Image: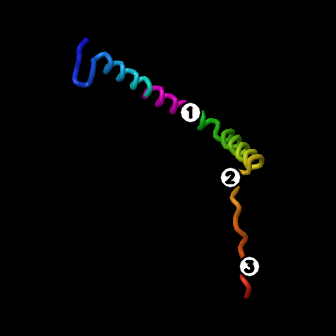
Amino acid sequence: MIRTSEGFITFILISVILTSIIAALTVGGKAICKTIAIYHSTTIILFTGRMIYYTKATVHIFSLHRPYRLKDKH
């Protein structure tokens, strides 16, 4: 095995190859998900809206209570 100041050359090559594979999967996955999001945007938004509604109704989060405004007395 060849040793460099950073470590063995095989470990460096394995590290570069694994990093390349992970980067390729990330970019490819993003492209696939973008395509799905473009063609199914309405379905995704309706599903998200329903989930927020049911979560708000059961767990009471996402509640945006506005304080009552005092009426001006003239």
Amino acid, disc 1: Cys
Residue at left 69%, top 39%? Answer: 43
Which corner quadrant of the image does residue 73 belong to? bottom right
Question: Is 44 above or below relative to 74?
Answer: above
Which corner quadrant of the image does residue 21 belong to? top left
Is the C-beta separation of discs 1 and 3 under 8 Å?
A: no
Element at badge 2?
loop
Residue corresponding to mark 1: 33
Q: Tell me how far mark 2 sits from mark 1, CA to CA.
A: 26 Å
Amino acid, disc 3: Lys
Which labelled disc corresponds to residue 62? 2
Residue at left 66%, top 39%? Answer: 44
Q: Is residue 8 left or right of residue 41?
A: left
Question: Is 20 above or below relative to 42?
Answer: above
Amino acid, disc 2: Phe
Question: Is 67 above or below relative to 62?
Answer: below
Residue corresponding to mark 3: 71
x and y percentages locating residue 51 in the rendered image: 71, 43
